[in-house]
Amino acid sequence: PRVIFAGARPDVPRFLSAADVFVMPSVFEGLGIALIEAQANGLPCLASPGVPAEAVVAEAAKRLGTFDAELWAQEIVRASAGPGRAPALPGIERFDAEKCAAKMFDIYERALKENQ
C-alpha cells in the first residue's frame, strides 16, 4: 500500500476516475464536499458518522455508523468487489468554489449583523 499526498490539484476528477472506492473516515466534516465530488464521479463511497448525512446523495454511497476498523475493512472490500462505478449523478453541476465562498460569506455576514 502506498499513499501519495498530491497537494492542491486542478484535475481531481482524473484522480477520482482512477480510484475503485472513496473512503472518508473523518471524525468531523462540515459538509463533506469531497464525498459529494466522489459520488458525482460515480465512485462507491463509504463515510464515517462524522460526515453529515446530507453529504450522502447517491445509492452507491454508504454512511457507516461506527469507527470499527474491522467493519470498515469488510465494507471497503465489499464496495471494491461490487458492480463498480455508477453513472455520474444527474443534476449535479460543476462545483464552483468562488460562488460557494460568496454564498458562505453572505450567510456569515447576515449572521454577524443579526447578532450585533
Image (tube, rainbow, N blue to C red):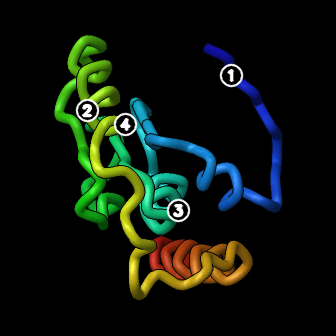
Q: Residues within 10 Å of mark 4 (few under 14, many from 20)?
A: some
The quadrant holding residue 89 is bottom left
Above or below for 81 versus 60: above
Residue in front for this viewpoint, 6 or 114 = 6
* Of the two numbered discs 3 and 2 in the rendering, the one whose residue sits closer to the viewer: 2
Q: Which residue is mark 3?
A: 37
Mark 1 to mark 2 CA distance (whole Å)? 21 Å
Q: Which residue is mark 1?
A: 3
SS at mark 2 in the image: helix
Q: Position of residue 1 (x, y in %)?
A: 61, 14
**Which disc is residue 74 wearing?**
none
Sequence-wise, the earlier of marks 3 and 4 is: 3
**Which disc is residue 80 wearing?**
4
SS at mark 3 in the image: helix
Q: Residue at x 29, y 53 (%)?
A: 61
Left of 59 or right of it: where is 81?
A: right
Sequence-wise, the earlier of marks 3 and 2 is: 3
* Of the two numbered discs 4 and 1 in the rendering, the one whose residue sits closer to the viewer: 4
Q: Is residue 48 visible?
A: yes
Task: Name the kind of residue labelled 3 in the image.
Answer: Glu
